[in-house]
Image (tube, rainbow, N blue to C red):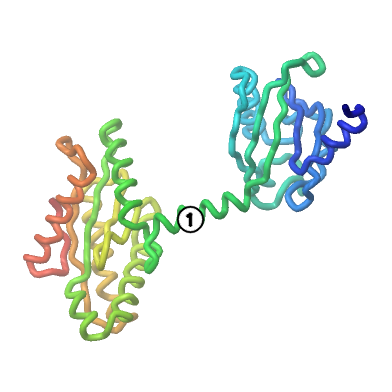
Amino acid sequence: MFTQQQLTSILSSLPDPAFILTRSGRYAAIFGGKDIRHYHEHSGLIGRSMFEVLKEEKARWFSAEIEKALAGGVLHIVEYELSGSDVKGAGDGPSHSIWFEGRVQALDFQVDGEPAVVWIASNITEKNAIQQKLRLLSETDALTGLYNRRKLLEILDSRLAVFERERAQTSVLVFDLDNFKRLNDEMGHHAGDAVLVEVARLCHQHLRKSDVIARFGGDEFVVVMPDTHRSDALEIAERLRKHVAISLRDVVRYESTISGGISEFGPPDRFSSDILARADAGLYQSKRSGRNRVSAL
């Protein structure tokens, strides 16, 4: 139906690039990639090896995916990231991260004496950015930017699995603002929101990078402290408590404090809610003892 020249022209007109890659990682041929919004000129790769063009780790990743496609014999789909740091040679490759979907199919004939695949690379950077944004919105609290309740429970479940498997300890701090309702009544909800935002900022400032911070609801916050025993977590929580009282007085112009409870995973725990319940009991013990303190259970 089509002449060889016409078929070559059709393949060259494909918007996404189609790479013919041999098992050893050589670029045997490249077709398409005409969508100049998303792709650079690729013809210079023909005849070269991925190991000449890409850093060792990235080239080995591509090689492994090629091997999977050859072994499976069916369409193999992967998502991957490429940036300038993945490419050998100063100034080569993209200056920012680009995301691709690779659709990899083994060919039923050899290319230059080697098994080979056709690898069609589709730029999905914009799609990935939208997905990341939607994921972020689904995981974070709109007011404070902290993780929300759903994400917190997901993280706690993960930490419980680590504890059960490796006995790597995790501690949890639950705290809230003392007399928060009175603050809202006296100064209005805008002031209350400002206090919550300031507390979130203080958590970022005074807690560790490894700590996971969430707004559990209302004025209640939860901090997950991986690889931390209860006694160490108590010291960290005490530092936060002191800083919150000072900052709310100086920045928000309102005398307020926090009360909290701390617990750690134990052998009886079957659910992440178990550690939350104990930390919450510690919080109420702090309230009964006069507020502005942290209790460990």
Q: Is the residue 193 above or below the residue 111 in the image? A: below
Q: Is the residue 243 above or below the residue 60 in the image? A: below
- In the picture, residue 119 is in which quadrant? top right
Amino acid on which disc 1 is placed: Leu
Percent x, y of residue 241? 24, 66
Q: Secondary structure at mark 1?
A: helix
Q: Is residue 72 left or right of residue 261?
A: right
- In the picture, residue 33 is in which quadrant? top right
Q: Is residue 143 left or right of residue 81?
A: left
* Mark 1: few/some/many CA within 10 Å (<14, 14-19, 20+): few
Q: Label 1 belongs to which residue?
A: 134
Q: How many marks?
A: 1
Q: What residue lies at 18% left-to-right and 72% top-to-bottom?
A: 178
Q: What residue lies at 37% left-to-right and 62% top-to-bottom?
A: 141
Q: Quadrant of the N terminus?
A: top right
- In the picture, residue 250 is in which quadrant? bottom left
